[in-house]
Structure formats: structure tokens, C-alpha cells
Image (cartoon, rainbow, N blue to C red):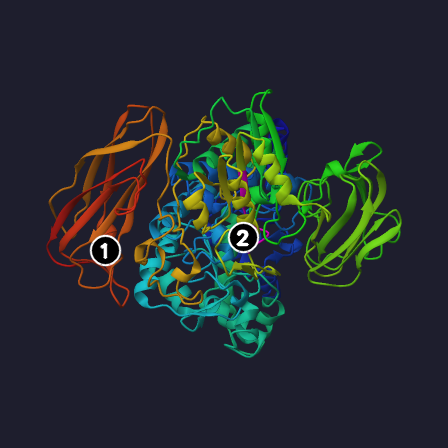
Amino acid sequence: MKTFARFLMITFGLLFGVLLGAQEVDYLNPELPIDQRVDDLVSRMTLEEKVSQMQDHAPAIPRLDIPEYNWWNEALHGVARAGTATVFPQAIGIAATWNTDLMAEIADVISTEARAKYHRAIENDNHGRYYGLTFWSPNINIFRDPRWGRGQETYGEDPYLTSRMGVEFVKGLQGDHPEYFKVIATPKHYVVHSGPEPLRHKFNATVNQRDLWDTYMPAFRATIQGAKAYSSMCAYNRTNGEACCGSNTLLKNILRNEWGFDGYIVSDCGAVEDIYNDHKMVKTAPEAAALAVQSGTDLNCGDVYEPALVQAVEQGLIAEETIDTSIKRLLRARMKLGMFDPPEMVPYTDITIDENDTPEHRELSRRAAQESIVLLKNSDDILPLGENIRKIAVIGPTADSYAMLVGNYNGTPSKYVTPLQGIKNKVPADVEVEYLRGSNPVRGGAVIHDFSNDLVSVEGKTGLYAEYFNNRNLKGEPFFTGTATINSYSWLWGESVPDLGRGEEFSVRWKATLTAPETGKMNFIVSGSDGYRLKIDGNTILSDWDENEVSTTEGAVQVVKGEEYEFVMEFFQATNWPRLSVQWQMLDANPIQEATELASESDVVIFVGGITAELEGEEMPIEVEGFRGGDRTSIQLPTVQQKLLKALHKTGTPVVLVQSSGSALASSWAKENIPTILHLWYPGQEGGTALADVLFGDYSPGGRLPVTFYKSVDQLPPFDEYSMENRTYRYFDGEPLYPFGYGLSYTTFDYSSLKVPSEGTTDDEVNITVDVTNTGDMAGDEVVQLYVKDLAATGPVPLQSLQGMKRVHLESGETRTVEFTLQPENLALVTENGQRIVEPGEFEIFVGGGLPDNFPETSEVTSGKVTLTGETNFVD
């Protein structure tokens, strides 16, 4: 493959040289300065051509050799929505590793797989969405409130942790070549954006200058100035009255003028339309387009710029020279990605599809999942499980869930391991493992199962026979046929379906033989956009054959276990995003009784529960207990799962609770009654293997919480208030369920010989060292955390503030000296007008395995004080 790729590069390079010699144009001459090349290209473009390149789908301009390009690509925790890719733990899970070196490795792998996919796509003349090199990640908004459904996409609630993770992610994506980007990263959503999700298109986030610069801005500044991100995405909402994608304050004054950002800004999808349609800042699309571009929004995800920008020029609302500034930024990005140069000049063009989804990448996903798991409780030392275990009951609604593994904004793994599969793979042959789902994630009643390959077959092989038609009526000859396996909870995504996108009309028919899993009334639950219907033995069981954004329909049929039935599922897409999921349940079952009977005859119960990204996320059409529009109204473990957990506890069999979520869960009853609790997050494709490694002692858990786990929403301010008062560990004055930075280990760690200088000046760095010793019998990772308390501040400051962290691996009995260097900015406070200053006075420095007053029992915290003298230092 690599030999063939080099052949292609040489061939293309020769052709490129002939073309260059024939045309003699500056923009195709890689020897010239990039700005000269960009200026030359833009000078040859018409106004309409310029505007056409300023939307997420940029068409080809053949006369100028500008290829078609789609700017919209996703890579939150792996290359997303572009077929097979390595799926790492969700972003919040990676944050729980507190490991910046690991983050750098993950980001480098993601960019390698992105390049591999892009090169394969170009070979196949595929210029579609999700196959490009400009990625709309990372999400570095502060996870200020656990109710926000998209908090799973972030690195948690702390500005320092978010900054450090974000910087490594951006660097890993963009690479370190002086001339070319590997790919381009896009920190988002700039800025002050974290729900409520249903109001995001019209919401005004009001925030004072202290909170803006102390909490919401640091990660953006770090990724722009420190990591040199070449793109940024502006948010949907308004901030202090200005639409974020039309804000001179945010985009022009701060991002470009103060921070020196010279890349391009892309709007969130539909955000420019929001400027006039929802925010009512202006009345028309041309006015909104002009405002956005004049403020600095170069690229519109949406369809406002074309033709509104041309109309804006005609109406005198904007000068064409201003449009030239934006299009030059965009073309400079494409040139720095190597899209106008001979492949042999671009250092990343030898990356082939063979470097996608490799065993090494999957092993890195496993390691990341291991490091992300947080042990919250282990009071009876049930974990790690011993050799005396002969029968294990695996129970819970996410124990065998694909959706739980992958979170949102995910790719499609070629292989994945659920907790159930991981446990089965781990135990010896003489250990019995039995599984029951036990309950639904949220609602009561009969257990709902995702439809799986083992239910259906085609000519003796598992799966369904699929026929895709290029119309909405299942007419004519299908353009795609084949046996389709169910490798995603959505039947229209995955490896065994054609590449389908928004706005393409098509229809599909799946046919198979259904083998009934049980005797009784089998109920089917189908959710999808536009129209669908299900037939069993020729009878229509359910139907909603109409244009819908999303609808859910149910229908039941009497079946006999082991009997075969003709199964036909049909679907059509009109204009919506194509989605269809099929689930089933046996209505006559008593799931809790079945689960308690299994628990009673087992040596240990591993209960895997919580939620999935199907319940928390982005603008989701849901309204069920505790969930609304992708956000949560409650942070409790869902009631039906609490009921099941209590029933299992009553059996007397030891219960290990494994929680899945992308956010905090308030499992207060479990903390008081269940001896062992692990938090799994959304752990990626190898999550089940990583969990089994922890359960059976092959790996000592070392993850730490990147968010505060509150007891209930009663401890929180109103969700739509953006003041940081009483939010996050930095300002929350109540008692949490589990604190930020918390996590137990199978071993113990001692801290000694802390060295903090007693004196310093306000403009000097402060050097700190501490010895960390593993005093237990097992090797393990400790996350060494450094917190600062300003004891003499003249204005409001955080209760404590994370300003240093380092994850270290220690063998039993090993001691290591850990060093930290605090710069003046690490000791700064933010004034009411947003200035960062270092005042003379006393600071207390805490170093240990958690928060100063709330650290885990397997670690400790030590402290020292430093007094700074000199004049107040205004930190830039």
C-alpha cells in the first residue's frame, strides 16, 4: 500500500509540475511565500466564487483547480461519522485520566487515522462531509452544571485541567511541522456556552468580567496562544447581549487583536441564521451575513452566506475587501494542509488506510479506558475479585450496550467489547457468567433490548438483506444491496450501509428470518426520522409512513420461542438526518424477579447501570424522567435502576456497582449501602476489557473525577444562570457526594519532603518538589494534584484552584520526586474588570491525591506556605 501511495505521489508530482509549468501562476507555486500565493488566487476569483467557498460545503472551481471540499469533520474522541475508526473514551473520560501525555498520544493517533481516511477518500473521488482534514474539536466549554447534556464532550469543570488537556489535543491533531498541518483543530464553542440545550439558538449568557476571564476564557486562550489552534468555532448563543458569531468584542477585539489569532473562525451550524431569526439582532439574512463576516466569522456552517453575502455587497452592507480577508484565511488553511502542493512536499501524504484502526491504536484505546475508570468506593475490599468466585451475575441496562461504550460524536469501531463481553473474556472456563438486563435505563416495565444480529438471519447467516433505492417509494432497481449486520444502534450508520447524508432522498427495505427469543408477546419499538413500517409474516405491526423529524411507534405480535417469522423493515428519508433504531421487548416478563433470582444463586453481582448518550446529549427530542431536550432535569441514578439495585442488595450477595455516564450521577443510596462503586464514563470500544482488567486486579484504578459529583440538583443554582457562585469545586461551599479530583486505588500513597520556598516575589516563578511513595502491595498510578489558596486576596478568589497535576506510575515501595513550577499566572486573581494580577501576600500550596479538605483515603495531602513580596504584578 505504501509503495502504491509513493507511486501515486510521484505520478501526481510529475503531472503537477507539467501543470505548473504550463500555467505559470503564483498560487500553484509552492516555492513562493504562502501569502503571495493566497493573494494571487483570490485576485482571480469572482465575488460569487469567493462566497461559495465560505460555507461548510465548498464546491469545486475547475477553472482555478480548486477542488471540492467539505469543512465539516468531527474527531471528538476518534474520527467520527466516517466509517471504521478507533473509538477512544469520551472526552470526559479522557479528562478523568488526568494524563496529558496520554492525551497527546490519542490526538496523534486520531490525526493519523484522519489523514488515512482523507487520502483514501480522495483516491475514490469522495469529497464528502466527515472525510476532510478540518476538525470541529475539541469542545473546551466549562462543564459548569451537571445537567448539561453535552458536558460529556468536555474536559470537565476546571479551567486548568481543561486547558492542559485542550492544548495537548490541539497539538496532537495539528502536528509539529513548520510548514504544514497534519489536520486543523477547532476549539469550540467560543464562548460562555453550556446549556440549556433547547434554548441555545436564542439564549443570552450573562456573565461578569471576573467569571468570564477566571473560568470561561482560560482554555480558549491556552489552545489559541499556547497550542496555536488554527481555527475556532463561535457559539450559537449571545454572550452579554452580543451574538457570539457576530461579536466584535469576542471575535475581533479579544480573539484576534488581544490574542493574535490569525486562523479562521467557523460558525456553529445555523448560528448565523440565528442572528436574525432567533436573536433578532438584525432583520435580514444579508444583514446577518455582513455582521458575522465583519466581526470575523469567516466560514458559515449553514446556508446563509450564499447568496446573502453577495446581496450584502450589492446593498452596501459590506465591502468585498472584507470578504477577501475571510476567504484568504480559508484558502491559507487549505494550502497549509497541502491541498495545493505536490504530495511529495507534504510530510503526511504517505499515511495510508493501513494506519487506520490498527491493533496498536485499539490497545491505546484500552489503556485510555483503564486510566479513565474511577474507583469511588471499595469499603469491604470486594475488589479486586478473588479466585474463589465461581459464579458471576452481570446485571444492568448498560452491561451489554454498544451505545454506552461510544458516547456521542463517535466513530464506528471494527471491534468492541462491552462490560459483559469483557468479563466473559477474562474469567477462566470454570467460572460461570450469567447476564440479565434487569431493567430499562429509565422507564419501568418489560426490558427493552436493542435489536441484534442473533435475532435475524439470511439464508442461514446472521444479519439482514438490505435493498437501498434512490427514491422514497422503494421503486425500481436498488442502487445498493447486500447483507447488513447491525453494528450500531442506528440502522443507517455503520460499515454495511452506503454513505448516506442529510438531504438525500432514498428508501430502504430490510428482509430476514426472525427467530423468536422467547414465547409471549414480542413488542417492537421503532424510532426514526421520516417514514418507517414493520411487517411480520406479511402483517403490518407498526407504521408511521410520513415525513417526521423524529417519531417513535410500537407494535406487538405473539411469538413462540425458536419459531421463525418473516421480518421486513422499510424506511424512507425525505429531508431530515437519516436515523432509524429498532428495539424489542417481551411484554410478559418480570425482569426484577428474574434478576434477584439470578443474584441469589451467584457469588457476586456486577451491576452495570447508569445512562448513555441516547439520554444526554445535543438537542435531543426526549421527555422522560430526569431528561429533557438532551439536558437532565435530575442527576439521580434513574428510579427504575435504583429499584433494581435495592432488590439486588436485599439478596445479600455482594454487589459491585459500575456506573456509566458522561457526567455526575447522584447515587446517594448506593454510596451508603453498596460496598463497591466504579465510574466507567463512556469508555470507548475497549471499555469492557478495561473494566474487566480493573475488576480482576490486572490493573489498579487511577482515574480521578474531572467534575464534582453533587448529591442532587438542590445543591445547584438555576441551570440558566452563568454566575460561578456556588458552582464547581472552586466556588461550591456545600458537601459533595464525591469531590472533584477524587478517586481511590488498590494501593496507598504517602507524601513527604514537600519543599515550598517560604518567600518569593510577585513576578518570579515558584518551584515546588514533593516525594510520593507507593506504600501498598500493588503497583499503581497516583495523580499528584497541586492546589493554590490565596490567603491574603483583596477581592473574591476561588476556595482553592488546581494549578498543577502529574500522573505517575509507582511500583510497590517505589518513591519518586515530583516537581512543579508555578508561574505568576498560576497565582493570579481576576479583578472585577477582568484583569489578572498577582498581589503580594501569603499563599498556601497543597500537594496530594485530592482536594485539600476532601481527599481519598488511599492517599493524602500535604501543604506549605509562600509569601510573595513586591509590587502588584499585572499578568498579561
Q: Does the magenta stretch include residue 609?
A: yes
**Residue 717 seen in the current view:** yes
Residue 484 shown left or right of residue 285 in the figure: right
Q: How many marks?
A: 2
- Residue at position x 54%, y 68% in the image: 272
Question: Of marks 1 and 2, which one's residue comes earlier in the chain?
Answer: 2
Residue 664 shown left or right of residue 441 in the figure: left
Picture quadrant where residue 719 is located = bottom left
Classify mark 1: helix, strand or loop.
loop
Residue 165 shown left or right of residue 638 in the figure: left
Q: Is residue 328 above or below residue 661?
A: below
Picture quadrant where residue 192 is located = bottom left
Q: Could you say where residue 390 lies in the image, as x and y percent from the top left?
A: 55, 24
Q: Could you say where residue 9 lies in the image, as x and y percent from the top left?
A: 60, 35
Q: Nearer the viewer, residue 187 or 680?
A: 680
Q: Does the magenta stretch include residue 507?
A: no
- Residue at position x 23%, y 42% in the image: 821
Q: Provide the residue designation for mark 1.
A: 828
Picture quadrant where residue 627 is located = bottom right
Nearer to us: label 1 or label 2: 2
Disc marking residue 638? 2
Q: How far apart are marks 1 and 2 (CA)?
A: 41 Å
